[in-house]
């Protein structure tokens, strides 16, 4: 209760402060732009608060796309101005906007993260999260490219089997969201760190979940705030990861661990172009970046696959057919392999359609490195930029009948370039895309060969804050699969 009042009081003080600042400040543009060209059209609202409340509330009501489409229709369909997270911001829309931002990475634009991210990650405070993620990007493809992931398919299959045996067997009803979280975290612990015992995974999961929920939060470091709890949790997680890394160094030196057993071994044995190896804390932060980047996103994708399959029996049966053909082709106890994954084409098209309609990330931010002109408008240096998955995913020009669930959109050459962007695009495209694809496909294989299911709450609301989740965790009734070969 004290905590409730403390938070309430803090937000009240902030609201009053922001409102007074807005009253006393002039209505000048906060841009510092020196060109004569106009800024994009749009509304920046009250200073500091800007349009953050509208942005947050459309998400919390389950329709984040409304924020984008309302403004595209009212102001301009290619780019409009707003102010969210206390910053003036240009929102780039449509395939043209995506193409522009994705192809100008490190030329006209660079990555930008909200303050809470920079403040929580200590290494990003030393350099800036942008520098950190540049270093990370150079190394990550080595660990997460499809060739490197081949060897982990069997491992992923056996973790999925253990997950289903431990948490699903004997249940007639489950809450899907926490189960998906458990699955993605267990999987990541195994593939990144070779950690697989449920009690070890659970020990790391507790502080990790606190950290994950504070990364995108209001950066107020007062006792009890999500941000404050995240900073404390970060220290625990880094200590735990530090201990794992030191142990692994010894095991590698004594040849008790293999150089290819997981992503941690790879990181420890990979040097940069100057022959320099990463230090312990660098590696801990990179593993943490992967854990954070891949946790809630893949969890949301899996949860929404389950939701859509419950709602669409015809699609469910086609996925079932494809997965049972694969299951029936395996000898008893034989694990899935890379070729099996290649056969899951329809299932992957379904997952793609799910991430078109319910993208785990709504978009991402950039910062203008210099002033430039776009669509005839000046974008001042330092302005924050945003691209949104919805501006194309829900557009009838990019996807005819956009509300219709239609996995055939992904057959053949698939959607036009820069229209389907759940993983972003260009040099900054999500480095975990292939890994995410594997864990989603392996999950689909296991759930469908074991169960039919239905939603217990037919009209469960969806909250997008900023990742989409079913408000009650997607309560699901399970029926054992009669044709199961599980
Ligand atoms: C369905 C699951 C996922 C979706 C939809 C997704 C989507 C995205 C998007 C949209 C971005 C931002 C791209 C941009 O800035 O333009 C991103 C970045 C990132 N993702 Fe993912 N992601 C997923 C899973 C994963 C997984 C499993 C991992 C780790 C194995 C991962 C690691 C990262 C990292 C480290 C970044 C930051 C890269 C950087 O700063 O350059 N993601 N992801």
Image (spheres, grey):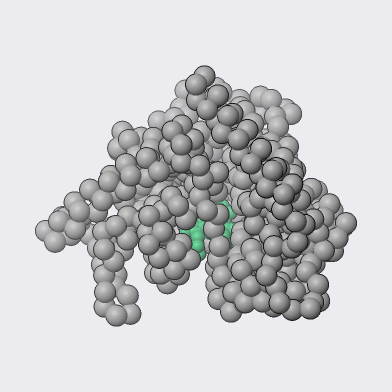
Q: Is residue 232 above or below residue 75?
A: above
56 or 26: which is nearer to us?
26
Q: Residue at x 61, y 68 (%)?
A: 382
Toward the front, the furthest residue is 24
Instruction: List x then y, in percent, for residue 29.
Output: 74, 63
Instruction: List x then y, in percent, for residue 103.
Output: 63, 76
Image-quadrant location for residue 470: top right
Q: Residue at x 49, y 52 (%)?
A: 117
Left or right, 324 with reference to 333 = right
Image-quadrant location for residue 113: bottom right
- Number of on-image labels: 0
Q: Residue at x 55, y 30 (%)?
A: 7
Instruction: List x then y, in percent, for residue 343.
Output: 56, 58
Toward the right, the furthest residue is 74
Q: Residue at x 70, y 42 (%)?
A: 19
Image-quadrant location for residue 89: bottom right
208 or 35: which is nearer to us?
35
205 or 401: which is nearer to us?
205
Residue 376 visible? yes
Q: Is residue 461 above or below residue 352?
A: above
Instruction: List x then y, in percent, for residue 3.
Output: 50, 25
Left or right, 418 with reference to 70 = left
Toward the left, the furthest residue is 254
331 or 44: which is nearer to us?
44
Residue 441 visible? no
Left or right, 187 with reference to 458 = left
């Amino acid at each position: 209760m004290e905590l409730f009042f403390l938070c309430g009081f803090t937000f009240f003080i902030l609201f009053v402060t922001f409102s007074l600042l807005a009253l006393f400040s002039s209505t000048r543009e906060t841009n510092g732009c020196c060109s004569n060209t106009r800024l994009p059209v749009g509304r920046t609202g009250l200073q500091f608060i800007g349009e953050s409340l509208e942005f947050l509330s459309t998400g919390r009501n389950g329709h984040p796309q409304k924020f984008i489409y309302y403004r595209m229709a009212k102001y301009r369909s290619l780019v409009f101005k707003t102010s969210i997270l206390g910053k003036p911001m240009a929102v780039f829309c449509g395939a043209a906007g995506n193409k522009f931002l994705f192809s100008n990475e490190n030329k006209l634009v660079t990555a930008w993260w909200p303050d809470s991210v920079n403040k929580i990650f200590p290494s990003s405070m030393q350099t800036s999260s942008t520098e950190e993620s540049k270093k990370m990007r150079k190394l990550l493809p080595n660990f997460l490219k499809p060739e490197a992931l081949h060897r982990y398919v069997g491992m992923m299959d056996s973790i999925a089997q253990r997950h289903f045996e431990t948490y699903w067997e004997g249940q007639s009803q489950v809450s899907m969201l926490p189960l998906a979280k458990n699955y993605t975290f267990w999987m990541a612990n195994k593939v990144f760190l070779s950690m697989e015992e449920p009690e070890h995974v659970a020990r790391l999961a507790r502080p990790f979940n606190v950290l994950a929920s504070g990364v995108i939060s209001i950066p107020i470091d007062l006792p009890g705030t999500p941000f404050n709890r995240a900073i404390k949790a970060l220290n625990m997680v880094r200590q735990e990861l530090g201990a794992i890394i030191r142990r692994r160094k010894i095991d590698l030196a004594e040849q008790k661990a293999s150089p290819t057993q997981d992503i941690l071994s790879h990181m420890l044995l990979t040097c940069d172009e100057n022959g320099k190896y990463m230090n312990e804390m660098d590696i801990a932060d990179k593993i943490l970046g992967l854990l954070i980047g891949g946790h809630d996103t893949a969890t949301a994708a899996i949860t929404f696959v389950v939701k859509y399959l419950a709602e669409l029996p015809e699609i469910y049966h086609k996925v079932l057919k494809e997965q049972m053909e694969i299951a029936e082709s395996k000898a008893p106890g034989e694990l899935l392999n890379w070729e099996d994954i290649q056969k899951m084409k329809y299932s992957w098209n379904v997952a793609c359609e799910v991430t078109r309609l319910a993208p785990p990330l709504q978009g991402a931010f950039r910062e203008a490195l210099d002033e430039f002109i776009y669509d005839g408008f000046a974008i001042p240096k330092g302005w924050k930029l945003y691209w949104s998955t919805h501006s194309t995913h829900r557009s009838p020009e990019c996807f005819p009948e956009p509300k219709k669930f239609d996995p055939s959109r992904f057959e053949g050459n698939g959607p036009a370039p820069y229209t389907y962007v759940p993983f972003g695009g260009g040099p900054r495209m999500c480095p975990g895309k292939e890994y995410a694809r594997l864990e989603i496909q392996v999950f689909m294989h296991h759930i469908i060969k074991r169960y039919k299911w239905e939603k217990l709450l037919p009209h469960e609301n969806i909250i997008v804050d900023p990742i989409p989740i079913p408000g009650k965790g997607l309560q699901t009734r399970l029926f054992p699969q009669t044709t199961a070969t599980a």
